[in-house]
């Protein structure tokens, strides 16, 4: 195991290239199961979740070839192999295997998903959708069993706006008989990306990106080639890093509309931002940043996935700020780590109250989940001295080539092997 080392205080300059969207990739790869001929996906991020999903497709009889950012998937020999444990436990997005396998084979056995521990994130809306389409769903010994004689289109109202449930129901419905209508659907750009892939495969989907999606089932889907949209969360993370330590940083391969809520808050803080068609330029504001209040909301509101790195930035801003997360109630695990670095923050319920303007100090901290890891990297870039971050495997799930990209901007960041003593402390913690 490794730890990430950051010597803070180095200004960032230059251009950084944003990778393909992680939250698209983890849905698009399972979606390829639905095709009857090869699917090629371009612009994939170099992250561990992509590797794990590729291996899962091979477990059910497919063949894959991952080269650079391109994955070629041959689904012709796939079958409804049960996946009760193993790799499915390593990432939350393994639940997309449920919708794809149910849609293709009318049955699936999938272990309950893993991924970041962000508190209760039930999949009841997914199951509600599968049952509405005609599937029998049972939970046996930590695995979900799905079985249907046939899938019939239905009208499904999601009680909670859920990206995962919206995509999973889409995957199950595209080869169902008749029309499926998903009401109160999530609107995230990643849903449009998945709908674009499925449409290229021959699916009939209308309304993706709105709160009502209509799907007319088809008998078969064919292969296609698809390029993933840029990762708005990675782009937002680099925009935050540039706001914290940048002199002049160009974030390239980004769709500005996808990060508009973040840009609006950063401008409110005093960050100087210029938008182009597919890039964003962040310039230093030497007059200092001002604290702001922010509340996470479903898209197009402020993303919960950027709440944690944004909280780190607010420790640098003058005055008090409040961050409220309405999406996940356990997404403040990074706060204790920021306090170790000297941040003045307290948590009250779903809100974090930040008294900014203090200088962070390098410390030994642990990433408890993916975006908490990003928050600690932001903090490490700003801090005096060296910050040691363990739990790097969480960061690797969502940020491909993070060190290389930051080194290219002028950061002093590197990896070291954990000592036996450090490994023992982690295992006993």
Image: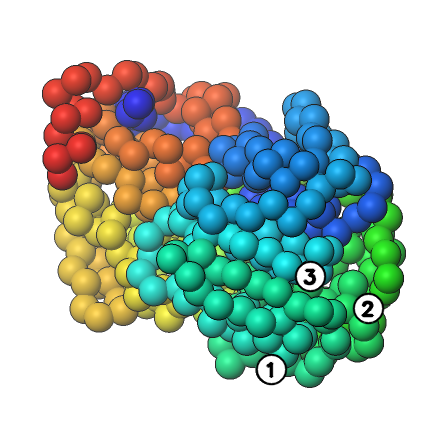
Q: In terms of secondary structure, where does tag 2 sit? A: loop
From what the image shows, is residue 315 above or below residue 218? above
Is residue 184 shown to the viewer in this render? Answer: no
Q: Looking at the image, tell me whether mark 3 or mark 2 is earlier in sequence order.
A: 3
Q: What distance separates the C-alpha of mark 1 from that of mark 2?
A: 18 Å
Where residue 247 sits, quadrant-wise, is top left
Where residue 165 is drawn, which disc sits there? none
Q: Say few, some or many: other residues with alpha carbon within 10 Å of mark 2 (under 14 / 14 to 19 / 20 or more).
A: many
Residue on which disc 1 sits: 157
Whole-percent x, y for residue 389 in the image: 26, 31
Would you say 341 lies left or right of 295 here? left
Would you say 127 lies left or right of 270 here? right
* Quadrant holding the C terminus: top left
Camera-side mark, 1 or 2: 2
Residue on which disc 2 sits: 217
Q: Say few, some or many: other residues with alpha carbon within 10 Å of mark 1 (under 14 / 14 to 19 / 20 or more).
A: some
Residue on which disc 3 sits: 106
Q: Looking at the image, tell me whether mark 1 or mark 2 is earlier in sequence order.
A: 1
Where residue 403 sits, quadrant-wise, is top left
Q: In terms of secondary structure, where does tag 1 sit? A: strand
Instruction: Tell me whether circle 3 and circle 1 mark residues in contact (CB < 8 Å).
Output: no
Q: What distance separates the C-alpha of mark 3 from that of mark 2?
A: 14 Å
Whole-percent x, y for residue 283 in the image: 49, 40
From what the image shows, is residue 136 above or below residue 245? below
Depth order, front residue of 318/187:
187
Camera-side mark, 3 or 2: 3
Would you say 193 lies left or right of 1 here? right
Q: Residue at x 34, y 64 (%)?
A: 120
Q: In terms of secondary structure, where does tag 3 sit? A: loop
């Amino acid at each position: 195991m490794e730890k990430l080392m950051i010597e803070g205080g180095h200004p960032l300059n230059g251009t950084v290239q944003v990778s393909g969207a992680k939250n698209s990739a983890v849905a698009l790869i399972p979606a390829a199961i639905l095709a009857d001929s090869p699917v090629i996906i371009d612009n994939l991020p170099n992250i561990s979740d992509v590797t794990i999903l590729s291996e899962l497709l091979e477990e059910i009889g497919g063949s894959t070839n991952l080269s650079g950012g391109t994955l070629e998937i041959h689904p012709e020999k796939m079958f409804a192999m049960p996946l009760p444990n193993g790799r499915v436990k390593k990432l939350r997005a393994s639940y997309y295997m449920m919708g794809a396998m149910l849609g293709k084979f009318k049955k699936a056995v999938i272990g309950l998903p893993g991924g970041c521990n962000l508190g209760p994130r039930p999949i009841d809306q997914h199951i509600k959708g599968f049952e509405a389409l005609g599937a029998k769903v049972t939970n046996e010994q930590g695995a979900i069993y799905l079985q249907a004689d046939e899938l019939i289109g239905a009208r499904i109202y999601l009680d909670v706006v859920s990206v995962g449930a919206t995509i999973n129901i889409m995957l199950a419905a595209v080869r169902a008989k008749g029309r499926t209508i998903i009401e109160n659907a999530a609107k995230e750009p990643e849903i449009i990306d998945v709908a674009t892939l499925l449409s290229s495969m021959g699916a009939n989907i209308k309304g993706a990106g709105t709160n009502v999606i209509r799907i007319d089932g088809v008998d078969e889907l064919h292969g296609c080639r698809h390029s993933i949209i840029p990762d708005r969360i990675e782009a937002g993370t680099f925009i935050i890093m540039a706001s914290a330590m940048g002199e002049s940083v160009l974030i390239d391969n980004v769709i500005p509309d996808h990060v508009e809520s973040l840009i609006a808050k950063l401008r409110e803080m005093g960050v100087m931002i210029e938008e182009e068609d597919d890039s964003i330029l962040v310039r230093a504001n030497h007059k200092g940043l001002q604290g702001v209040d922010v509340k996470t909301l479903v898209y197009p509101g402020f993303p919960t996935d950027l709440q944690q790195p944004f909280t780190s930035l607010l420790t640098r801003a003058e005055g008090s700020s409040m961050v409220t997360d309405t999406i996940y109630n356990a997404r403040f695990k990074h706060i204790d780590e920021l306090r170790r670095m000297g941040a003045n923050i307290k948590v009250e319920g779903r809100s974090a109250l930040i008294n900014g303007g203090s200088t962070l100090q390098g410390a030994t901290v642990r990433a408890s989940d993916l975006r908490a890891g990003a928050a600690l990297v932001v903090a490490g870039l700003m801090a005096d001295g060296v910050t040691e971050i363990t739990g790097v495997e969480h960061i690797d799930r969502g940020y491909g080539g993070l060190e290389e990209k930051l080194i290219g901007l002028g950061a002093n960041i590197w990896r070291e092997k954990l000592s036996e003593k450090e490994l023992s402390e982690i295992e006993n913690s």
